[in-house]
Image (tube, rainbow, N blue to C red):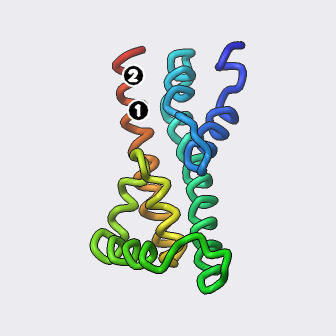
Amino acid sequence: MDIAAFGLPGLFLAGFIAASPLPMQSEVVFLALQAAGFAALPLVIWASAGNILGSCVTYAIGRWAGSLHGSRWFPFRPETLDRARHWWQRWGLWSLLLSWAPGGDLVVALAGLMRVPLPVFLLLVAVAKTGRYAVVAWAGAGLFG
């Protein structure tokens, strides 16, 4: 089946899934649509929107996990949580600018667990995710332009 048939909504979904705990590489879909003739700006907008929303789901999972603290269902041992807090104190908010990179979903979930305010989280993740897709569009323009 032709990837272009799914168009921008398909790219939104790929971006969403890629930022969730599920494995997915949205860049492949992005580049396939760019090669099919889709303009870069709409691709960046749709991919970023899906990826940011997917990150919000991962962030919410982290916040939810934090609400279980003290119960038998809490997924982390105390020493693991202490290490996570120490790491967050050292690297903290600015690590969200690498939320696009491999392992970025863990940073996003940790931001939820550490109760980062949602507006701050959204700003940093939006900059990171949109910047990544802008670079993918630039690279794609070099390949297909």
The residue that mark 2 highlights is 141
The residue that mark 1 highlights is 136
Give the amino acid type for the residue marked by disc 1 in the picture: Val
Q: Residue furthest left?
A: 90
Question: What label does residue 88 carry, if any?
Answer: none
The location of residue 47, given as percent across then percent down, is 56, 40
Q: Nearer the viewer, residue 144 or 96?
A: 96
Instruction: Look at 62% across and 75% down and name the residue there.
Output: 74
Instruction: Look at 65% across and 19% down and name the residue there.
Output: 3
The location of residue 130, given as percent across then percent down, is 45, 47
Give the amino acid type for the residue marked by disc 2 in the picture: Ala
Q: Quadrant of residue 89?
A: bottom left
Locate the N terminus by quadrant: top right
Q: Residue furthest bottom?
A: 70
Please rate how many residues cluster around mark 2, counting C-alpha atoms within 10 Å: few if below 14, some from 14 to 19, many from 20.
some
Instruction: Look at 61% across and 86% down and name the residue there.
Output: 70
Q: Nearer the viewer, residue 73 or 119?
A: 73
